[in-house]
Amino acid sequence: MHQFNLKRLGQLIRKQWVENTRLYLYSILALFCMLSIVFMIWLFADGSNYDETSIPVMFFFGLFISGAVFASTAFKSLESKNKGIYWLSFPASHLEKLLTAIFYNLIVFTVVYCACYYVVSKAAIAIVESMVRKQPSEYHFERIHWGNEQQTRQIFIYLFYAFIAVQALYLLGSVYFKRFSFILTTIVLGLLFVGMIYYFQKLSESFPHNFYYRDGFIIARIPGHLNPRRIEIPVFLKDSFLFLLKFIWAPVFWVAAWYRLKEKEI
Amino acid sequence: MVDIQALQFGYKKKKVFDGLSLEFKPGCIYGLLGKNGTGKSTLLRNIHGLIYPDKGTIKVLGHNPRKRSPEFLRDVYMIPEEFYLPNVPIRKFVSCNAPFYPKFDLKQFETYLKEFEIPLENTLQQMSYGQKKKVLISFALACNTSLVLMDEPSNGLDIMSKSQFRKVLAAAVNEQKCIIISTHQVRDLEALIDHITIIDEGKILFDHSLEEIQRRLSFSFSLERQLPASVIYFEQALTGNALISASEEDDGDSSGKIDLELLYKAVITKGPEIKMAFESKHSLI
């Protein structure tokens, strides 16, 4: 009960905004300029043939990179003693302080990024379309073909889950590492990624040579049988594993960040 | 209000406190004195829950500071030596910080600012270090928290401001409030402090109220070359000697104004003798 109070959380969010308005507005401007530069490069580098497929690719690339940079500054005030004392001694719980950081880093950042990206990409597409209209023989604009729409949507959703997890990891990094949190968290992320690949590699190697995994089934080629046998992983186990893989990362990192905040000394 | 029992604390290589026990009561202004690096700021940060004891317990207003619960934090305010204030107008600072302190009094804040001659319309960014400190002191006192911790509050204040600070602090203190001031500049707070705690090498060397000091010690100035036998500590001045002697009578009749700087030096250099003066009724060297 003492750890969470909605009114206090609202006041904390407001306080964060009031005290950092200038920083946030400059950050939005910087993001806008960065995206404009990226799209200008796209306009010039693609020569006369423009491919709309680049736009979602650039969207996610920018979202992950800028999101990670922003999240790694979430607890920057803890880097300095003066700001750290001001921040830690403020009468709000660690949970409320963490939720405020998540609110700005995940919700506000994502909304602002999407809005900026939408404006800049629409402007870039409008420029390309106008060039194509004026000189159709010289310029060509290849529209995106989504193909299997449901599958594409699924990929986007997975990418978004991954974004939340990466954001949460950088948020944890910003409270865990006293200095160079972005660089150190990137190293941890790299190690985590390599470790996972190594683990899955070892897991697949542990299967007998005539067993392999595909689409939720373990396929076994039994000598003497023409058709391979399909062994289905129990639905409950498969769903649980998938659920954990999709959703567990961010909460784990947030809980770790909360513990770290509680133990933080200045 | 603050109860510290067998506190042990150390940084990586340096032990700061080894079994420190101390109590701070409401209605008092405590002067926490000691050499540089002796643990004054560390003690304040322990009390505020910014660092955690290795062993021992600290209870502040019935709370464990380590938890840094909102209920605890809203009743304790700390003014660190090196502090941070956001770059916003004073009014905005108050509007977004004051709601977290239920006993905050805007009128009181405005009165203090007026005393410090700081216009409420100012932006913190435009202010000097000293002016910012005055805003912080005003805000801290207007929050009316039960415990106020001040680390070198008079640092960075000019002569006039120090006098304003004393006035503001005197107006803010009451029976429910406890103010702990860590300082080197004892003269700045001489008229305010009513309890002296001297820390050295992580140990309490001296912990007495001004009333008790007045009763036990006598502060005087002598032009004579020959010093009386009861003198515990003396300091040569141009025209004579400033003396601290053990009071012969325990009748509360003070002789001479307490010189905190002299007392501090006496405690540091003549610790056992000073201790003896407080232990025996008719102290003798």
Image: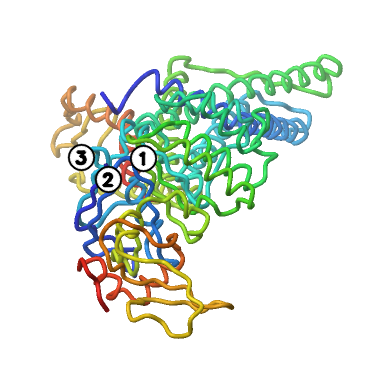
Tell me which amino acid carries mark 2.
Answer: Val
- The residue at which mark 1 appears reads as B147
| Few, some or many residues within 10 Å of mark 2 (<14, 14–19, 20+) | some
* Tag 1 and tag 2 share a subunit: yes
| Few, some or many residues within 10 Å of mark 3 (<14, 14–19, 20+) | some
The chain ID associated with circle 1 is B
Element assignment for label 3: strand
Tell me which amino acid carries mark 1.
Answer: Leu
Image coordinates of residue B67 in percent, x first then y, are 28, 40
Point out the image quarter for the C terminus of chain B: bottom left
Disc 1 vs disc 3: Cβ atoms closer than 8 Å? no
Q: Which mark is residue A211?
A: 3
Cα gap from disc 3 to disc 2, whole angstroms: 68 Å
The chain ID associated with circle 2 is B
Image coordinates of residue A140 in percent, x first then y, are 75, 22
Q: Farthest bottom residue?
A: B226
Q: Which mark is residue B39?
A: none
Query: Which residue appears at 35% of the width and 55% of the height?
Result: B210
Nearest the viewer among B212 and A20 is: B212
The answer to whether B245 is drawn above or below residue A11 in the figure is: below
